[in-house]
Amino acid sequence: MTKVYEKSPVFFDTFERKPSYKETTHYCPGCGHGVLHKIIADQLAELGLQDRTIIVGPVGCGVFIYYYFDCAAVSSAHGRASAVATGVSRANPDSVTISYQGDGDLAAIGTSNAIHAANRGENMIVFFVNNNIYGMTGGQLAPTTLIDQISTTSPYGRTVKNDGFPLRMAEMMAGLEAPTLVARVAVNNPKNIRQATRVIKQGLEVQRDKKGYVFIEVLAQCPTNWKKDPKDACEWIDNVVCKQYPLGIYKDQVAEREAQERPCERVDFAAVARQLGLEESPEKPENQIEMIAEELRFKFAGFGGQGVLSLGMLMAQMSMEHDMDVTWLPSYGPEMRGGVANSSVVVSKNKIGSPVVDHPDVLVALNGPSLEKFGPLVPAGGLIIYNSSLIDHVPDGLKGKVYPLAATDLATEAGTAKAANVVVLGFVAQKTNMFELADLEKFLAKSFKKPALLDVNIKALRAGWEAADKS
Amino acid sequence: MKKLVKGNEAVVIGALVAGCDAYYGYPITPASEIAHAASEYFLPLGKVFVQAECETGAINMVFGSASSGLRVMTASSGPGISLKMEGVSYLAGAQLPCVIVDVQRVGPGLGNIGPEQGDYFQVVKGGGHGDYRCIVLAPSSVEETYHMTIEAFDLADKWRTPVFILTDATLGQMIEPIDIRQEKIHRAEKPWAVTATPESNENLVTSIYLDFDDMENYINFLHDKYRQITETEAKAEVYGADVPDIVLTGYGITGRMLRSAVDKLNEIGIDATLIRPQTLWPFPTDVYRKIVKPGVPVLSVELSRGQFIEDVRLALPNNKVKWYGRVGGHLPELNELVNQAELCLKEAAND
Ligand code: SF4
């Protein structure tokens, strides 16, 4: 006697992952899931893919697919199988990742995840089991339920007016550019099963060869919720369901596609450091900071585009290189409206507590509104430096010491009005005793690589420094 | 080597130093710079970066890669974290290690993009369905954000659990120096992961236990683990006077501002001490009980109208704990905090 068929070795002999009744499946008699499982298991065995296969199960009757397949498996939340499978596939570039989903799962709650996995062309094969009803939850209306079909949530039959049209997923998926193979098959009679087997085999080969995304919609019988005996259920697919959901290959680009490798690399710290552009031993400034106080709290304010944020950053960067603790906080949200941007910088010899600058020791106001807003907040003993090129009105009653600085004019003289913030940097550095001119110039040389630009900025810096010297 | 970086970028650098393999995210202000930096650094290194179709997509991609044994992360802000919570419950249920960053903004609803700490309940007490816990780390500076991200990956591996890093719009947007160097990483063996090898065929990542007894045993097992985490991982910074007249407490950016308030109070002759929880779950109850003697008043400050304070009160049932905070995107001024502390002391004296 010759053996013509045996149980796929990809199936368990007994279902040990099942809590009880380990010899029987949990599916109803005549259910289409079992037939589909058998085809998949046979083809995985034939192609020798069992040890590379990872099955992502859905929520629905297929939730317990892992009872039967002797493969690694992951359960996902309702509708999320395609997203979970994306994470599995990206993490395991050599895997055959199967996402097994029902019609509620894929075509209702998880449509977005399903479409986008397809659209990215993930290396995965999706089995979309369309039995046009919710099985496990008790026979409710699915997006795929036929017009007039009775379900527990369409007790008078599905109407277009209330529920819209049955959703044709294979056609939708085939409209996308990324998928490699899209088909609709059925598992209700020997002829359809043979055709399904061919397509499924081809789909698994695509996975073996890493040629991208495969979507196989499988019309499956659900005798229980259709309230039909298994034979009638199979016939109903031929006579009714297939009219709404025609079988066929909707897209086939298997021959044209190349393998797509998506890396998932482990790298060492050296590679990370290179990627971050970390220097081995950065040049240290020569001079120590002798600030006028242990801690200085700065506010730089002006129009957006006047470089107040980058002025703050220049100060912060210089301070850090001088081994000071420093924080930089940008103005945010509604504060940004009305044309006033600001950055708060705290420089300290000690660990900085609050990075928020309510009452600045040093205010730099590059435009009128900033001076109006922040000037009164500067306490006695604080410095208020304002851009006298643009501001002609100084509010009364300021407590801080007020310095006009024609920052825009001086910058224009140096070569560009854009360098006004560097004029300010020179002024502030001199007034607060924070940095030596030579260190600042070295710092600018690192920041401005183009000689002409550097030249302008050095001129601007010196102009600011000299103005501070004189005032 | 020292580098000036935004809090949001520090998360990504920390992740790289910790050997994070994959990032899945979705844009949202004020967390987007995390995704920007992740895409900039991960892709050229051959690591996985995917901008997902939605927050649920991102968290479920995290689920898939965590199932596969990767070090994996995602980040968002309040509204996005709400969406991710379904996935967080499944991750906790399946005991999958991963790191999730919440850069808190103002809520409820759309709120605004300013700083707030209103996600405390959502992140610290659950948020998703079911009876689970996640470790929650609360940095208060960019440097700490960096180090806690590295630590978060180790904790996630060690305990097989999702770990949250709870920051806010201010911490995410501010820039400070961080010192980047190679760190000792404790990457766990993950024999349970699905890896497309024959050895992993028997592996099953799931959170479903149909049998009531099995499920009860599993939940009890999880809670036994949570008890161990509570006993070993709770942490807080204590700063200021040894024998305080008043204790100030807050986490994250607020905790840091309170450090300045403590300095100010000590300058004017009031012995004040800061307790700043660095883990919000587990909550450092023991630290509070050790530092705060009976009768000492406590000022609890948060950028929400009374969430964090519930845990402080649970830790200190016999002390008067007064709430103070700002919401809507405002940060309290230093003077405001000092005044509140003085008021709190005065009220305690009158009691
Ligand atoms: S309810 Fe339907 S789909 Fe579910 S197992 Fe039974 S027959 Fe199969």
Image (tube, rainbow, N blue to C red):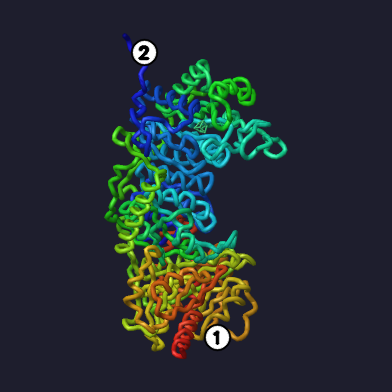
Q: Secondary structure at mark 1?
A: loop
Q: Say left or right for B227 vs B338.
A: left
Residue B351 locus on image (x, y percent): 46, 89
**Alpha-carbon span between mark 2 and mark 1:** 99 Å
Image quadrant in which you'd find residue B46: top left
From what the image shows, is residue A88 above or below residue A375? Answer: above
Q: Secondary structure at mark 2?
A: loop
Is residue A360 at least partly visible in the picture? yes
In this view, the residue farthest toward the right is: A161
Residue A275 locus on image (x, y percent): 37, 49
Residue at image location 48% in from the left, 57% down from the top = B127
Residue A136: give its label.
none
Query: In this orientation, which residue lies closer to the viewer: B151 or A431?
Result: B151
Query: In this orientation, which residue lies closer to the viewer: A286 or A350?
Result: A350
Query: Mark 2 falls within which chain?
Result: A
- Image quarter where the N terminus of chain A lies is top left
Query: Mark 1 falls within which chain?
Result: A
From what the image shows, is residue A271 above or below residue A26? Answer: below
Sequence-wise, which precedes: disc 2 or disc 1? Answer: 2
Image quadrant in which you'd find residue B226: bottom left
Image quadrant in which you'd find residue A399: bottom right
Mark 2 is surrounded, within 10 Å at the Cα level, by few (under 14), some (14 to 19) or many (20 or more) other residues, namely few
Query: In this orientation, which residue lies closer to the viewer: A464 or A231?
Result: A231
Residue A4: give its label.
2
In this view, the residue farthest toward the bottom is: B350
**Residue type highlighted by circle 2:** Val
From what the image shows, is residue A92 above or below residue A325? Answer: above
Residue A399: give its label.
1
Is residue A442 at least partly visible in the picture? no
Which one is in front in this view, the residue at disc 2 or the one at disc 1?
A: 2
**Residue type highlighted by circle 1:** Lys
